[in-house]
Amino acid sequence: MDDTNRSRSEVTRPDRPSLTCILPAYNEGENLAHLVPRLTEYLTRFTDRIELLIVDDGSQDDTAAIATALADTYPVTLLQLSRNFGKEAALSAGIDHADGDVVLLMDADGQHPLEVVEQFFHYWHQGYDMVYGVRDNRDDESAGKRHLTNLFYRILSRSAEINIHPDAGDFRLLDRKVVLALRQLPERSRMMKGLYAWVGFSSKSVTFTVAPRLGGTSNFRLRHLSALALTGFTSFSSAPLRVWMLLGAGVSVLSLLYAFVIVLRTLMFGSDVPGWPTIAAGIAFLGGIQLFSVGILGEYIARIFSEVKARPLYLVGRRVSFRDRDNTVEGTSDDA
């Protein structure tokens, strides 16, 4: 996304704003134990009021126990969801419960380098409402995944009313006004990268190099990426419906032309046109198109069905906050 012409907010911002750092976590207990102390110490450079909001998305390991223990020493609040709702829901839960003047979104695996946060704050103080990280390479991914990712975002950006940088992620700093805007969005089928772009506001990108994971392996699988891509298309673009409408119109026109040729040959040469194999192939082809188009339509109907049910995007099973503990943490205060 070219953000050089996105206007900045002409406001005076506090030198040391209150900060909520959202860390969505799924089976990241070991990584949190190493990340939280470093992150807390680093963030005191920019603010005296810190809250590390760990959203446990139904982890199967000791993520909740470690986060609870960390709250005795560090400014940690644990938001434990009742089950695994997915990263998009976990991010939304964090945004809904964030109290800071600015909100920092980071992964809990340590792959988002802390030194980039200084640049985030620099551009926020200059007036940008949203500062987001852009990966400088995808060398850790297969060539096939890189090509598919670029193709997906290129098609989505051209077919939708939003423009999403293919190498941007959830690593970003949000002003309070952006957080409040995101809270107003009611949809259940979510692609957060699309929602960040949809709400607008002045934005600035910062290039960074992805760091190695502190430990463990990624919990994001190909099926998750495929489901997210499908959500992106159905949430932000009606192009698939339009494409198949045009394809149907094109096939209909060709069918009419072919029928005209058959009638003309019969009138001119007095013989019918043989070709049962041709007819069978045509029926199979048209049947396949119909089933595929019905499948696309079904995806949109399924999204509508999900939205109409209006079930909660997530459920909170337990909340533990450092504010409820009798502890004093350097760089924090009770009104963070």
Image: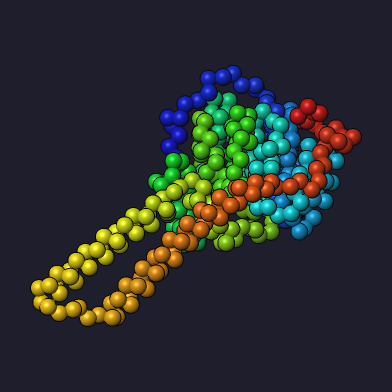
Query: Which quadrant of the figure contains the N terminus?
Result: top left
Q: State whether residue 255 is above or below residue 212.
A: below
Depth check: give the residue in front, 136 or 225: 225
Q: Residue 323: x percent and y percent?
A: 83, 34
| Residue 181 in sight from this viewpoint | yes
Q: State whether residue 86 is above or below residue 143.
A: above
Query: Which quadrant of the figure contains the C terminus?
Result: top right
Q: State whether residue 327 is above or below residue 85.
A: above
Depth check: give the residue in front, 303 or 131: 303
Q: Residue 91: x percent and y percent?
A: 65, 44
Q: Residue 104: x percent and y percent?
A: 64, 37
How many marks the image carries: the answer is: 0
Residue placed furthest toward the left: 268
Asked whether, in this view, residue 252 is left or right of residue 315, the answer is: left
Q: What scheme was used to colour the molecule?
A: rainbow
Residue placed furthest toward the right: 326
Q: Please tell me in which quadrant of the rendered image residue 265 appears.
A: bottom left
